[in-house]
Amino acid sequence: MAKKIILALIILILSASLFLMFFVNDNVNVYIDGENVTVSTQSLSHKNTEQLNEEICNLTLNVMNDTKANITTLKNGIKSICIDYGLENMEINIDSSIGKNQIPVIVQVEGTSMLPTLQDGQTAFINKTHNIHVGDIVVAESDEYGGIIKRVGDIKGDSVYLISDNKDVSYEYINGSLYEIKGITTWVDISDINGVVIEY
């Protein structure tokens, strides 16, 4: 009788192990709210996930600030980190305050070139994407001006023409010369677009 009970227990343990192996997925869950990142990892084979979660969190923050990075960059980066930890079959789930597989970012407006739409110092909420249309307000990285927030005036292939909403023109003497002061207009590559403003 004791042998039958022990055999039954062994079969039960093996069945439970097989069930967990085949039906319970290891996964990484990332949640982004625009400025904060939360990471949780569930793995049957890796118990100490604190360092793993920290690396994924740092990667996510870097992707949020990199104009060339997107959701694919983030998922591939997380996969690579997991492989480094010996976790090769992780399911990666990205969720955010604007939906699944989206990367929201909160930015601060600097300057008056987008008046009256955007005020100097206010915050804007962007969806990190290169899917843009004429009329959208976008955040971009310009070689000439650095980080800018402008409206899309035109799109020609991969080139995007950005304009200011503020059409006021003023004149100012600087070191004895008269300068025209007006909003920025510039062309950037689509890869320099960090995201589209979805709320302000």
Image (spheres, rainbow, N blue to C red):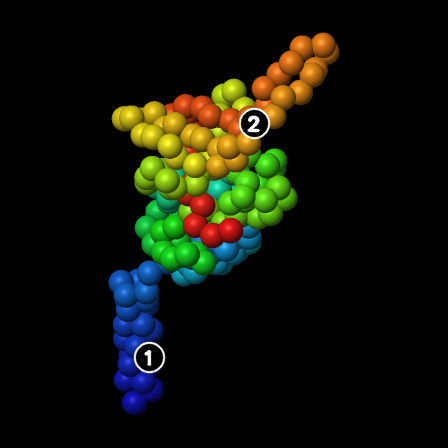
Q: Position of residue 107 (x, y in %)?
A: 55, 44
- Type of amino acid at the residue the image marks with label 1: Leu
Q: Which mark is residue 169?
A: 2
In the picture as drawn, the residue positioned furthest to the bottom comes out as 1
Q: Residue at x 32, y 50 (%)?
A: 89
In the rendered image, which residue does mark 1 sit on?
Answer: 9
User: Which image quadrant for residue 98?
Assistant: bottom left
Q: Secondary structure at mark 2?
A: loop
Q: Could you say which is closer to the camera, residue 137 or residue 75?
A: 137
Q: Is 180 situated left or right of 99 in this image?
A: right
Local crowd size for mark 1, using a 10 Å CA cut-off: few (<14), some (14–19), many (≥20):
few
Q: Secondary structure at mark 1?
A: helix
Q: Residue at x 32, y 85 (%)?
A: 5
Q: Quadrant of the N terminus?
A: bottom left
Q: Could you say which is closer to the camera, residue 70 or residue 150?
A: 150
Count of labels in the image = 2
- Type of amino acid at the residue the image marks with label 2: Val
Task: Answer above or below: position of 173 versus 98.
Answer: above
Q: Is 52 situated left or right of 122 in this image?
A: left
Can residue 55 be seen in the rendering of this structure?
A: no
Can residue 110 be seen in the rendering of this structure?
A: yes
Task: Answer above or below: position of 103 versus 159.
Answer: below
Q: Is 174 situated left or right of 28 in this image?
A: right
* Mark found first going from the N terminus, 1 or 2: 1
Local crowd size for mark 2, using a 10 Å CA cut-off: few (<14), some (14–19), many (≥20):
few
Q: Position of residue 127 (x, y in %)?
A: 42, 47
Task: Answer above or below: position of 197 versus 100.
Answer: above
